[in-house]
Each structure stands twice: as structure tokens, then as C-alpha cells.
Amino acid sequence: MTEARHTPRVFSGIQPSGGLTLGNYLGAMKRFVDMQDDGSETLYCMVDLHAITVWQDPAKLARATRELCAGYLASGLDPARSILFNQSQVPEHAQLAWIFNCVARMGWMQRMTQFKDKAGKNAQNASLGLFAYPALMAADILAYHATHVPVGEDQKQHLELTRDIAAKFNHDYEVDFFPLTEPVIEGAATRVMSLRDGSKKMSKSDPSDMSRINLTDDADTIAKKIRKAKTDPEPLPAEVEELEGRPEARNLVNIYAALSAQSVEQVMRDCGGKPFSEFKPMLADLAVETLAPISSEMARLMQDEAEIDRILAEGAARARAIATPILRETFKIVGMVGA
Ligand code: TYM
């Protein structure tokens, strides 16, 4: 009911916390590009306010924000078709997040697995921002009445919380104002795993650089990491079901499928029976073919920071034009005088 009332609008974000991985690319950026031409308005954010929930060196944060913007552009996002901006430049995110801090319950936040993972054993020492992180994320999405959010599997719980916040706000204030946003978690690579351990997510924070492919890795490094990726001694099976219990094999097949825009079934049909000594070089070639132009384009774009800043400023102005009336209406609903 709520969804139908809202014009389809896509929002997603990535933290500029340094080091984009193949997981970010396949789970998010590539899919952002795919959705750019689906006919909906698309907004893609560099969530710098989220990044500082853990310590960030200021100069590195600024560089990572520009590098992420370069990554978006190099992957195929077009500032004429998508709104690209950094979160801190649209104050409505932080303002709406405050309202949502007052809607969300402590218990909801305490259940968030990402908080538990990131805070580790010493949760008392985590920042208050890290705890409230999902309320800011809900604000990112709902400040635009976004209806669809493409993300990787690890963000699912946060998106469920976004729906809970929208529903509680609508219920408490007796309005039908915020949409119940749909997570879009689709494709073969919604959870790209570590190359060293098929039970762990590929992540920029893994201490081993061999566990991940970085978007800035050169061709030799990519090939070496794939060659050394952990596997089992069996050749690839011809049926998807037979990948059961073989997480490392499954992961490489998923990556291959996502990079080549094929289904996992198709890859199995073509590659079933091949030993890894044959499959890994095929995968390495495909990864290099896809990533090398992205990393060289990122390096080129990073030569012109002024142009990146111009794109971000223009994106922020366009984003504000959407978020300002939604925030004003939210304030009115809540009873803020002057809104
Ligand atoms: P972040 O910055 O950790 O990751 C950005 C995006 O990359 C996806 N991703 C992966 N997908 C598949 N396999 C992997 N190994 C992998 N690693 C990362 C993530 O799922 C995500 O889609 N909280 C978010 C950022 C955020 C956001 C938002 C997202 C803030 N506000 C509003 C959507 C809407 C985050 O930390 O993503």
C-alpha cells in the first residue's frame, strides 16, 4: 500500500573508509550501475558520517571519499543520470537521523550483528555513533522516500530495521508517510567470501591482503591472489547442488558468474569437470579484464580532485532538493514549530 504511493526511487551508499574490494564492486557498485538505467531515479552516496563511527584520519577520509567517487564513476555511474554525493553535505541526513534515534528502541540496536562484530569485546568503548549507525542509515534512505536499496547480504538486517523505523514512525504519528523500503539483494555475488577462508566475508578489514581483491590491485596481484586462493582438490562439478559443502569452490564460481553476468547454472554447465588449475586462470583473466580498466580510470580521475569535488557539490544540491521538503514535512508531522 505504502510502496505503491511512492515513486520508485533507488538509494544506496558505501563507506569511504579506504580500500574498495571486489565484494563492494560485485555486491554493490556493479549493481548500482545496472539499476541506473532501470527507469527510476538513482541516488548513490559516499557515507562519510557513517565512516567516522570508527576513527578515521581526516586526510585519509577526504582521500577515500574522493577515491570512492572516482570508483563510482569508473564503474560506470554517470552524474547526469545518477545523483552522486557525500552524506555530510546534505544536513537532512543527520537531522532525520535524530528523529529516528527517538523512534528506534535500544533493544533493536542491541540486536544488530554488525554492531556486535564491529564493537567486539569492548562494546563500552565503542562510539555512540556506532551504536546509532542503523538509525542514520534509515535516515539516508527515508530522507528520499527511497523504495529500493541495492546492497550486499550483510546489510539485510539494517534494512529490516529501516522498515521497522518507518513502520513505527507511521504508526506512532498515525500517518502513511514513509515507505517500507525493499532491499534488493540479488545476483550471484551478494556475499563474496574471503579468498583464504570460504566461511568469512571478503572485507577491507581482514588482516590478510591475500584474502581480498582490491579495486586498486594491478593485474599481476589479482592473478596471484586468485592462483593462491584456497580451494579443495576436486574438480568443479557440473551441478550447482554439488557445490554444497565446498564454500571456497562456490565462492569462486559465484565471482565468475557475477563478473561474466551469467547464472551460476550456466557457469557450471560450461566449466563443470574442469580442475582448478584450469578454472583459476580463466577467472583471473576475467577479473583482470573487468577490474584493470576500472582501476586505471580511478587513477586518472584522481588526478583532478577539483572535478570530483564539483560533481559531489552538484550531487549534494540535487539531493537536498529532494530531501528538504521531506524533512520539513517530517518536522511538521512531529510538531516542530516553524517547519
Ligand atoms: P559498506 O561500506 O560496508 O559496503 C558497501 C556495500 O558493499 C557491500 N559489500 C559486499 N557485498 C558482497 N560481498 C562482500 N564481501 C561485500 N562487502 C561489502 C555491502 O553489502 C554494501 O552494499 N551500512 C552500509 C553503508 C550504508 C548504506 C546506507 C547502504 C550507509 N547508509 C543506506 C545502503 C543504504 C555499509 O557499511 O556498507
Image: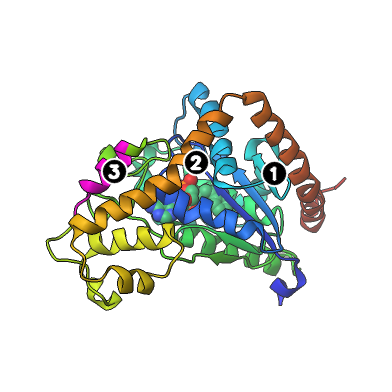
Q: Residues within 10 Å of mark 1 (few under 14, many from 20)?
A: some
Pick the residue in front: 336 or 176: 176
Image point 85% across, 48% down: which residue? 339
- First in sequence: mark 3 or mark 1? 1
For the residues bearing labels 1 and 2, Cβ distance under 8 angstroms: no
Q: Main secondary structure of the magenta part?
A: helix
The type of residue carrying mark 1 is: Pro
**In the displayed structure, does residue 98 sit left or right of residue 132?**
right
The type of residue carrying mark 2 is: Ile
Range of residues picked out in magenta: 220-230
Dot 3 lies on which element?
Answer: helix
Mark 3–mark 1 distance (CA, rounded to whole Å): 32 Å
Dot 2 lies on which element?
Answer: helix
Image point 81% across, 46% down: which residue? 321
Residue at the disc numbered 2:
294
User: x and y percent of residue 236 in the render?
Assistant: 22, 67
Query: Where residue 223 is drawn, which disc sits there?
Result: 3
The type of residue carrying mark 3 is: Ala
Image point 31% across, 71% down: which residue? 268
Q: Nearer the viewer, mark 1 or mark 2?
A: 2
- First in sequence: mark 3 or mark 2? 3
Query: Where residue 79 is drawn, which disc sits there?
Result: 1
Q: Quadrant of the N terminus?
A: bottom right
**In the displayed structure, does residue 3 sit left or right of residue 223?**
right
Pick the residue in front: 75 or 171: 75
Q: Nearer the viewer, mark 3 or mark 1?
A: 3
For the residues bearing labels 3 and 2, Cβ distance under 8 angstroms: no
**In the displayed structure, does residue 306 sit left or right of residue 291?**
right
